[in-house]
Image (tube, coloured by chain):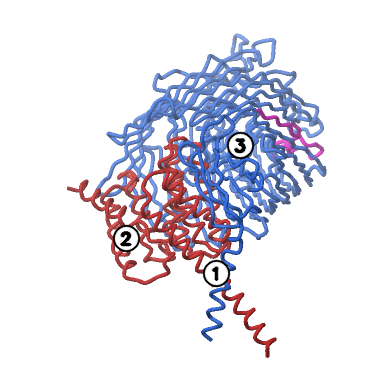
Chain colours: A red, B blue
Amino acid sequence: MKRQITLTTAFLLILGTVMAQQSNFEKTMMEALNQLDKAKSTTELQDVSGKFERIARVETERWEPYYYHAMILINLSFSEKDRERKDALLDDAQKGIDKALECNGNKSELHALQGFLYQGRLQVSPARAANYSRKAAEILGQAVGEDPANPRALYLLGMNLYYTPKAFGGGASAALPKFMEAKKMFEMQQEQVNSELLPKWGAEMNQGMIDACNRQNN
Amino acid sequence: MKRILATIVLFSCIIASPYSVNAQMHIQGRVTDKNGNALAGANIIVKGTYDGTSTDSTGRYRLTIDNVNSVLVVSYVGYDEQEMPVEVFLKNNKIDFMLYESNNQIEGVVITAGTFETADRVRSVTLQPLDILTTPSAAGDIYGALTSFPGAAVIGEDGRLFVRGGDGYETKTFIDGLLSKKPYSSSIPDMPSRGQFNPSLFSGTTFSTGGYSAEYGQALSSALILTSNGLPLKTQTDISLMSVGGGITQTLKGKNSSVAVGVEYMNLRPYTKLVKPSYKESHPFKSVGLTLVARQKVGDKGMVKLYNVFSQSEYGVEYPEFTLPGSMTSISLKNWNNYTNLTYSGNLGKEWSLKSGAALTLDNDKLHMQAFSVDEATSNVQAKISLRKKFNENASLLFGAEETFSLYSQNYVEVATAFINFSKFDDFCTAFFVETDYRPIPLIAFRAGIRSEHSSVIGENNLGLRLSAALKLTNHTQFSLAYGNFFQTPEEELLRFTHQLHYEQANHYITNIQWEQDNRILRVEAYHKDYSKLVIYNPVEFWNGNYYNNSGKGNSNGIDVFYRDKETFKTVEFWVSYSYVDSKRIYRDYPKMVTPPFAPKHSTSLVMKKWIPKITTQVGLSVSLASGRPYNNPNSQHFMNELTPFYNDVSINCSYLTTFFDKSTIIYSSVSNLLGRDNIFGYHYYSQPNSNGVYESVPVKADSKRFYLLVILITI
């Protein structure tokens, strides 16, 4: 009997440890996500990107830390001035996306992020515009296909159209329907009670683009 | 139960912070690059935990550590990370880190000798499909665009690529790794041919002017390697209306597949009414083309690509006959051609990738002149499989096999004498290749390959070596070397009369230095090319196989300079190239070693494109200049001893992007030879002298001085 209790205790102990780690992971992720929500400056973004990187290094089986780390690096690449540095940030982000896909992360979200990364590559040099705008559109289309309710994929697809010259079928009026659709999906997303760790960003930027489109159309 | 839970909670608390018994430690320091510049946002990580911090804008960090036995990791994007046991801080709680830029960020050196290629990175942007379409002197032709790059000569009466003092047949075109046996449109002598393929079908162009990979063979001088597009973006209809014809393409796109079908019709009859050609055209050029492009994604990274293009063309002209002065003959040419290319590429896992496919060329030319007629049929199938294993970022191995079957038949009939020569033969050419890429350190790269071929028609084996190396000198400069042995089975027109021949051979020695920064690239390449075993025959008895042998030889020495800039002027992109080549050879019916007509000593060109956002228009200008080309004057004692006047062309174009009934529309127009220079490519001499015993000549020129093109492209 005593032996049994010891075994049970040991088993529960292990379970408890796993659970504690689990909750520790979620807790730390939530902290980092809160910090991300508040982060405005480059320094704050770098800080929280560092946090996700540290989590990702421990939780190598989870896709979320890779996702957020990559997402912040892509954002940082837009504000970075030095071109080689931009590419270096995107190179690291690419590694993150690749790893997250290996962890069987949410395909639609990761492909949307891949599209965002291509848009990052595009803005490094105008010489890349044609190639990467095409690549981005392709993968974003795939992301929407995988989850038609993914607001980020729709928003990023809208961005692609917005910055495509009108003569090539882009421009504000072509992009607006995508942003509107994204808006609808952002609102639906809010109502759903999904995992806390799933990506939620983009609603404000999407609204900003809707306003920009409306200003241009008036 | 409550107790058990309580125990678990207690235990988990202990486990979650197992080392809290250790004394806390406050550590600090600074992270810089090798020049002492602060690295802001570097990550200081307590290895194996979530703990850590980031450096501030001055590169400083502060951190409290619970366990003396832990290890610190310092990481920063683009730099090599460093580790440091925390114990070290026991002596001094302040430690600075100096990080070094990491290899893959400096981007390991890439072999560049002999190659111009498309790449996505800023660092090596050289040649993209749009560049071809918007180069004014190219008039939408891939081969035309490549003559604005160094190494390729402008040979206005031919249209093929003549690279570094090499003949046109020495360049081969490959689509997705497979041979395109007849990449040029069919044409009569002195009329330039064009590429069969629409440049917009390709996302990548690698133009190798020498020293290329062991994957490609049977080309003495150069390989043009085209990579076709992946899945199209969406279902759409493209309509093109040209001053010389029109076409329509319907693209259908599914989730993982696509099909595009296109039809194109060209007829120069209306055009020749407006712009008179120099010789009377009984049948101005007319052609019909059908294109089918299909794509199917297989699995995550696999793709099946099918590409089929069929074309049929007709042309007739009244042209000098070159026997008695003043005599004319009517020439007519009918051609049909079909090219099929089917490939599969995919990942086999564990860093193995597979590329395989087959390409089929069927071609028939019917040439009629008053004195004789030629009916020529070519069939060619190539099947190829190649495997690549990537061991790591710095080492990979490529190997594969290739089988090419060619069947050639020609029926030559002389009307007056009823002389008939019918030749028909086939060739199985089997090839194996192995190549390895190795980068022992990021600054040095090696590529070594071997290729072996067996050609059944001449019953001979060959074994060629391909070596190249690159060394990164600074962040933006690199130095490359390449060496290679290249073999080519003698051309069909030579094999008509004998098969007792050997491979023609060329060895390439190339050295190259390249500087690249932002959107500027400068490269200077020097080369030496050695030809041996070129086929020689008797000019009088060219049909007599006994006079054929491989005793010809030659060499080319030269320098190519290329500068491209997308940076200095906003919205302006330009490139300048200059080539110097000193080429001599004795081959075919040459009696002695001379500079061939296709190797002008100096050639230079400038291409400039300006995008004017306000009116969504791009304007382009290209200027080419080349020194005179050798030609043979039978009135002179010496062979191939005279030079044509220099060549000059100024072309402009303009592409206007707009919407037409809400549909994307591009209006493109171009004019070649704006200055109207009377370029002379060479001279033909009548075979019979006139009454004064002098051989009279006719200059070879473009069929009309200027070429005007207007194209309207509408996408629905």
Quarter of the rendering containing residue B471:
top right
Q: Which residue position is annotated with label 3?
A: B100
Location of residue A54 with respect to B676 vertically, above or below: below
Count residues near mark 1 (Cα–Cα under 10 Å), then give few for <14, some for 14-19, many for 20+: some
Q: Could you tell me which residue is drawn at 30 percent across and 56 percent down?
A: A179
Give residue B714's position: percent from left, percent from top: 33, 47
What is the spatial separation of the Cα atoms under label 3 and label 1, in whole angstroms? 40 Å
Give residue B554's position: percent from left, percent from top: 74, 23
Chain under label 2?
A
Q: Which residue position is annotated with label 2?
A: A182
Chain under label 1?
B
What is the spatial separation of the Cα atoms under label 2 and label 3, in whole angstroms? 43 Å
Q: Say what secondary structure mark 2 lies in.
A: helix
Q: Earlier in the sequence, mark 3 or mark 1?
A: 1
Q: Say what secondary structure mark 3 lies in.
A: loop
Q: Could you tell me which residue is drawn at 53 percent across and 79 percent down?
A: B6
Tag 3: residue type? Answer: Tyr
Chain under label 3?
B
Count residues near mark 3 (Cα–Cα under 10 Å), then give few for <14, some for 14-19, many for 20+: some
Location of residue B308 with respect to B370 vertically, above or below: below
Count residues near mark 2 (Cα–Cα under 10 Å), then give few for <14, some for 14-19, many for 20+: many
The residue nearer to you, when weighing A175 against B544, is A175
Q: Are marks 3 and 1 on the same chain?
A: yes
Tag 2: residue type? Answer: Ala
Q: Say what secondary structure mark 1 lies in.
A: helix
Q: Is residue B346 visible?
A: no
Tag 1: residue type? Answer: Cys
Q: Is residue A135 visible?
A: yes
Q: Which residue position is annotated with label 1?
A: B13
Which residues, given as a range, are shown in magenta?
A: B479-506
The residue nearer to you, when weighing B49 against B14, is B14
**In this rendering, would B412 be left or right of B259?**
right
